[in-house]
Image (spheres, rainbow, N blue to C red):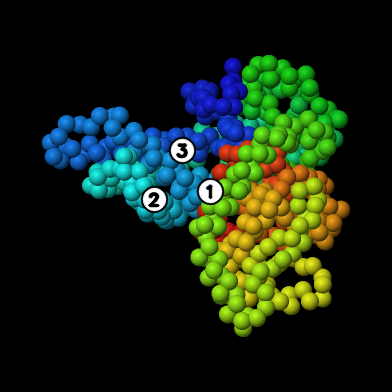
Amino acid sequence: MHNTNHFAIVPVIFNNSVIVALMIRLFRHYFSRTFITLLVAEMLHLFWSIYFGRSLQMLHYQDAMPQFSEVIPSALVFVMVMLAIMTAMGLYERNFWSGRSDMLLRVAVSFLVGLFMMTLAYYLFPEVSLGRVEFSLALGIAFVGVLTLRFVFFEVSDREVLKRRVLVLGVGQNALRIKELQQDGNTSFLVAGYVQLHENEKCCVPTEDLFTMHHLLDLADRLEIDELVVAPDDRRRGFPGEQILECKIQGFKISSFLVFYERETGKIQLDALRPSNLIFADGFQRALLKQAVKRVFDIAVSLLLLAIAWPLMLIATLAIWIESGFRGPILYRQTRVGFNKQLFEVIKFRSMRTDAEQDGVARWAQANDSRITRVGAVLRDTRIDELPQLFNVLRGDMSFVGPRPERPQFVAELSEKIPFYTMRHMTNPGITGWAQICYPYGASEQDAREKLQYDLYYIKNYSFFFDILILLQTVHTVLWGRGAH
């Protein structure tokens, strides 16, 4: 019997091969079981490194070994600080692996920042502090251990034996999209084959991986399948409902194409989406308590950032003023579409020439846009130009996290061309968001379609925890310059 638990990592044994179970869904957001396993391993290592650091110092002075309870407060603070920093460095993002040198750089920067943050934490909360020598030992143990864990873990996790074996029902465009996901690499699944449901179904996948519809349960057993993905382009023809039900009863995990795609990519596949999918889908709910928590969170984060970032904002103001010859506006106001399609004026530092749109025609911002000033390019790359939007958040026009607000001209145009585009106005727009950190800044209809898929995922799966995760990953986006415009 196949285990179908979504909320724990449970080994499933097939012919003496161990396959780690499905991706995990926590706080309405899907996480790769690979990164959850790595996260737990690193949490334990970071925790125990504090104990080992103190133990080594006491051994040096031939003192008694420390009591475990003595190090718990300091170890917990260390774990929370380091996990937050490592998340901000992009070490728990999907598809972040860019080679050993990149990994070493990110981990090294994380521990340098961690050293500063822990020094600050020990100064503010001396009751949880460690001695200089024992903390240095603990930090060294943690650094070496995290690097070792990551190099070993990614070497092992890339093995096919650790990936879920998937049987795709359908051979059309949806099946092709799944094949393309697998070809992109860093996936948690391996397609064992595709089943052609009827003779007239157009085949878009390799014939060597093709199986004809005969007895589905026997085929799933023979291929040692973990999950069946129901992905025909048209369910009205040749849909094997009874055989799929038989597989479900026997313990096989059954997923629709949309759910599978959402889980694996962190976005909703727009081309396969139908109104009925949204009507019956879990999510897309507005709860008063969630809205109240989000609003309090927005105000608290905005005030905190204004208190921290005001020197940067002052420097930006002076730089714009000097570059413009001590004339011209410092701030840039532009009408955008917000919650429930209501219009509001977004406030940003001016990064373009004052005559950028003197003809009154709205234009997408392009890469290497000639209208952007030298100071403006720096402000955009560092996202400093968006800091004045904190006042939009305080006024309630925007949230800190949400879909990027667009101009009315673009919204009117894209709403006619892209299905479900207006659904992104179901929530307040944000300074940062899931689409902004997952997809580089775009300036075309195709880019808008791609970002909408991430926006719909965010709206569908919103939670307070998801907002925290996006904020941490936004730090990584700013530091590594992805998506800057």
Label 1, label 2: how many angstroms apart (C-alpha)?
15 Å
In the figure, residue 27 lies in which quadrant? top right
Label 2, label 3: how many angstroms apart (C-alpha)?
20 Å
Camera-side residue of 196 and 116: 116
Q: Position of residue 183 (x, y in %)?
A: 62, 46
Q: Secondary structure at mark 1?
A: helix
Q: Secondary structure at mark 3?
A: helix
Marks 3 and 1, the one that precedes in the sequence: 3
Q: Residue at x 52, y 65 (%)?
A: 312
Q: Secondary structure at mark 2?
A: helix
Q: In the visual, does 122 lie left or right of 315?
A: left
Marks 1 and 2, the one that precedes in the sequence: 2
Camera-side residue of 147 and 18: 147
**Mark number for residue 472?**
1
Q: Position of residue 77 (x, y in %)?
A: 39, 40
Q: Note whether 373 is above or below 31 in the view shown.
A: below
Which residue lies most toward the bottom here?
A: 325
The kind of residue on which mark 2 rests is Met
The kind of residue on which mark 3 rests is Leu
The kind of residue on which mark 1 rests is Leu
Q: Residue at x 71, y 60 (%)?
A: 346
Label 3, label 1: how many angstroms apart (C-alpha)?
15 Å
Camera-side residue of 22 and 205: 22
Which residue is labeled 2 in the image? 117
